[in-house]
């Protein structure tokens, strides 16, 4: 099965020989069977929270603090499980994911810090109270949790069900009021699976004021699914914030490539609203509906 090797430096990709590159090109052409979407309910995690909480650590971004479980501890709780085996294989292959099997949800990505800081810096302008938010490809769920802590109703989506069960849901619980956990969870939903399947599973009436997604555009073959979901699930005046690297070495994806797809679609428009100035190039793209199409001269 195809493996995407990408990292923050990209040095390993630059050193690959042509033989290995050609082999991966052939593997990437194989048909991938993506996981079907399903809703994940947080019952077991509530019952086990007392065992999870003592091992939690703190994600810190300037003045923001979000409790979360450690990925290695989460893998230990999985035991001899398919995702654990896939994650172990990815690590042995010096990879961050295995396409269609494990999509990197156990790692807190660098761009997560960028987007949380951006949201905090613009909180007074954005306002999260009672907003409907989708944390797409959520992994640890830190983006969604940040908005949840500021009053939003959040849907958390990640490819692997086990990531939601062992990482995302425990993280949400760790940041709930202990006395009102079940009530606070009424503001959250959790879904696993492929984006196309997830989009189909949602009710026709489900729309989001804010869609947040981080490090999800490394695979250009999934851009169509992502854009379709944006078009079908974003409210008329909603906003998408996508944080990613300008280029993912070895797979061809990145912000420039994704912007081309947005431009070709024409129903959406995008602009770079933040970018770093040193090291590996990272950006935040703001995406909205292209209302200019409906303007009459």
Image (spheres, rainbow, N blue to C red):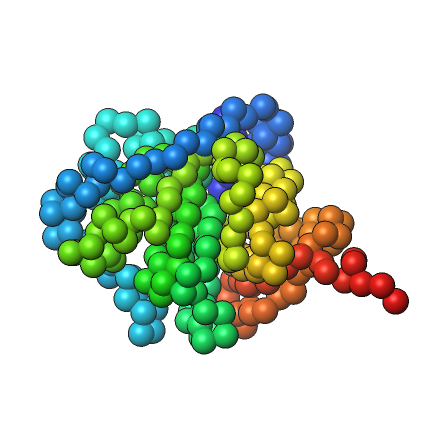
In the displayed structure, would residue 295 be above or below residue 52? Answer: below
Q: How many marks?
A: 0
Q: Nearer the viewer, residue 228 or 101?
A: 228
Residue 126 image position (x, y, % from top left): 49, 69
The quadrant of the image that shows the C terminus is: bottom right
Residue 71 image position (x, y, % from top left): 27, 46
Is any part of residue 140 visible from this angle?
Answer: no
Judged left or right of residue 163, residue 257 is: right
Judged left or right of residue 265, residue 217 is: left
Residue 250 image position (x, y, % from top left): 57, 44
Task: Residue at 19% x, 43% y: name it.
Answer: 46
Task: Residue at 52% x, 52% y: name it.
Answer: 208
Residue 109 image position (x, y, % from top left): 41, 54
- The quadrant holding residue 130 is bottom left
- The quadrant holding residue 235 is bottom right
Task: Residue at 52% x, 57% y: name it.
Answer: 209
Judged left or right of residue 221, residue 267 is: right
In the displayed structure, would residue 24 be above or below residue 244? Answer: above
Task: Residue at 27% x, 40% y: name it.
Answer: 42
Is any part of residue 192 visible from this angle?
Answer: yes
- The quadrant holding residue 29 is top right
């Amino acid at each position: 099965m195809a493996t995407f090797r990408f990292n923050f430096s990209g040095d390993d990709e630059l050193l690959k020989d042509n033989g290995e590159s050609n082999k991966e090109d052939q593997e990437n052409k194989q048909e991938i069977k993506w996981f079907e979407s399903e809703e994940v309910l947080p019952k077991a995690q509530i019952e086990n929270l007392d065992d999870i909480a003592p091992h939690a650590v703190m994600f810190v971004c300037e003045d923001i603090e979000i409790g979360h479980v450690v990925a290695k501890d989460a893998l230990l709780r999985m035991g001899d499980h398919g995702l654990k085996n896939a994650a172990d294989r990815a690590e042995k292959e010096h990879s961050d994911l295995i396409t269609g099997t494990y999509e990197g949800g156990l790692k807190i990505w660098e761009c997560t810090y960028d987007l949380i800081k951006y949201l905090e810096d613009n909180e007074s302008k954005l306002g999260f109270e009672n907003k409907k938010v989708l944390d797409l490809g959520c992994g640890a769920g830190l983006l969604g949790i940040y908005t949840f802590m500021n009053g939003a109703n959040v849907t958390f989506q990640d490819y692997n069900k086990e990531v939601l069960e062992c990482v995302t849901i425990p993280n949400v619980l760790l940041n709930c009021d202990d006395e009102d956990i079940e009530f606070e969870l009424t503001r959250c939903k959790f879904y696993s699976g492929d984006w196309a399947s997830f989009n189909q599973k949602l009710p026709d009436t489900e729309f989001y004021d804010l869609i947040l997604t981080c490090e999800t555009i490394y695979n250009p073959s999934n851009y169509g699914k992502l854009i379709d979901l944006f078009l079908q699930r974003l409210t008329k005046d909603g906003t998408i914030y996508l944080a990613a690297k300008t280029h993912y070495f070895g797979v061809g994806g990145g912000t420039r490539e994704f912007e081309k797809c947005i431009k070709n679609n024409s129903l959406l428009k995008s602009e770079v609203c933040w970018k770093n100035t040193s090291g590996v190039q990272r950006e935040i793209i703001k995406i909205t509906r292209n209302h200019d199409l409906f303007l009459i001269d």
